[in-house]
Image (cartoon, helix red, strand yellow):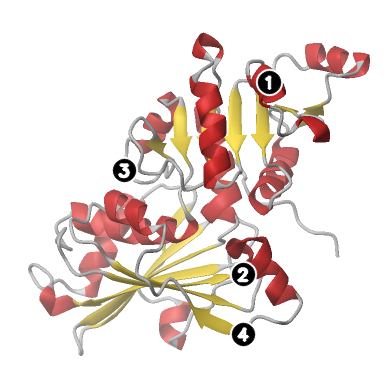
Amino acid sequence: MTTLDTRTPQGAASLQASAGKPTIFVDGAAGTTGLGIRERLDRQDIVTVRSLADDKRKDAGAKRALMAEVDLVILCLPDDAARETVALIDGMGASAPKVLDASTAFRVAEGWTYGFPELTPDQAGAIGAARKVANPGCYPTGAVALLRPLVDAGLIPADYPVTINAVSGYSGGGKTMIASFEDGTAPAFELYGLGLAHKHLPETQRYANLSRRPIFVPSVGDFRQGMLVSIPLHLDTLPGKPKGGDLHAALAQRYAGSTYVSVMPLDNAAARGGRIEPEALNETNKLELYVFASETHRQAVLVARLDNLGKGASGAAVQNMRLMLGFPDGADLDRPAKSP
């Protein structure tokens, strides 16, 4: 990645020298998701990143002028600020760049493409052709990855009463939550979203192809990052009374050949030990899917494991950026290793 400040002659000269690279602007680069994006771009060095001076970040005119000079804008902003910036882009006409939004503002909005490339066999192509892409939420990434193939295969009816449980590290909760955990004032674990109206529900329902609104119960634990999303099922309530192996086969077929999504064998270490922890994929863009099943009790639990800051945020954004700019999918999107 090349970062340029074109207010100086040196910056202008560097811009001309790097003209072969696509140019992007990360709006909100100082936040958790933005920092993760920048670190992954440093590793790949395939784009030139333009930036605004600190005193110009809220200057609509300066932002519009910069956006007219880049190929893609990545928004890492709160919902209202993202809507304001998209309104600026919409008013730019032919000079408008492509936009990738990491907020929840446009995930179910008309005219936007959902940025989960593994959603269907043709979704990566749709993202590559899109001018507006909404990066998925971390919880929906796991839930949709588990549910969509099974609904498409008819193994889970669209109107099935789905319950989704999930636990995340505290880094996904924003500055206030992060501060409370890091200063020791937060509880070690808590459920939240108990008003049953979590902001991730609309995208989960839409992209899982569910006609009935699922129940979603998220939670947060005293660890920085990592995530488990779990969905319990009574197998005898499903059409055809499938076995756990049938669910596993449908998932394996959907994600066969995927770079980032792995369907783990039925006989895996977590199944043998009867437990699974959330942090194993931290700093990666990987997503692991599990089927834990008991034929004796005719029950199953589907589990997705991912890094809420990787495949759940920054890694997914860089994967989508690559598709939108015409780069091949499948690059190394893991975050650079931290110094010891």
Q: Which of marks 2 and 1 is nearer the N terminus?
A: 1
Place of residue 306 in the rendered image (x, y in percent of width and height, measured from the top left): 52, 62
To which residue does mark 2 refer? 170
Q: In which quarter of the image is the N terminus?
A: top right
Q: Which of marks 4 and 3 is nearer the N terminus?
A: 3
Dividing the picture into quarters, in which one does residue 267 lie? bottom left
To which residue does mark 4 refer? 188
Q: Which of marks 2 and 3 is nearer the N terminus?
A: 3
Q: How far apart are marks 2 and 1 (CA)?
A: 36 Å
Q: Give the amino acid type for the residue marked by disc 2 in the picture.
A: Tyr
Q: Nearer the viewer, mark 2 or mark 3?
A: 2
Place of residue 191 in the rendered image (x, y in percent of width and height, measured from the top left): 47, 79
Q: Which of 303 and 6 is in front in this view?
A: 6
Q: How far apart are marks 2 and 3 (CA)?
A: 30 Å
Q: Which of marks 2 and 1 is in front?
A: 1
To which residue does mark 3 refer? 120
Q: Give the amino acid type for the residue marked by disc 1 in the picture.
A: Gly
Task: Name the secondary structure under disc 4.
Answer: loop
Q: Nearer the viewer, mark 4 or mark 1?
A: 1
- Above or below, 50 against 41 in this view is above
Q: Earlier in the sequence, mark 4 or mark 1?
A: 1
Task: Name the secondary structure under disc 3.
Answer: loop
Total residue callouts: 4
Mark identifier at residue 169: none
Q: Give the amino acid type for the residue marked by disc 4 in the picture.
A: Ala
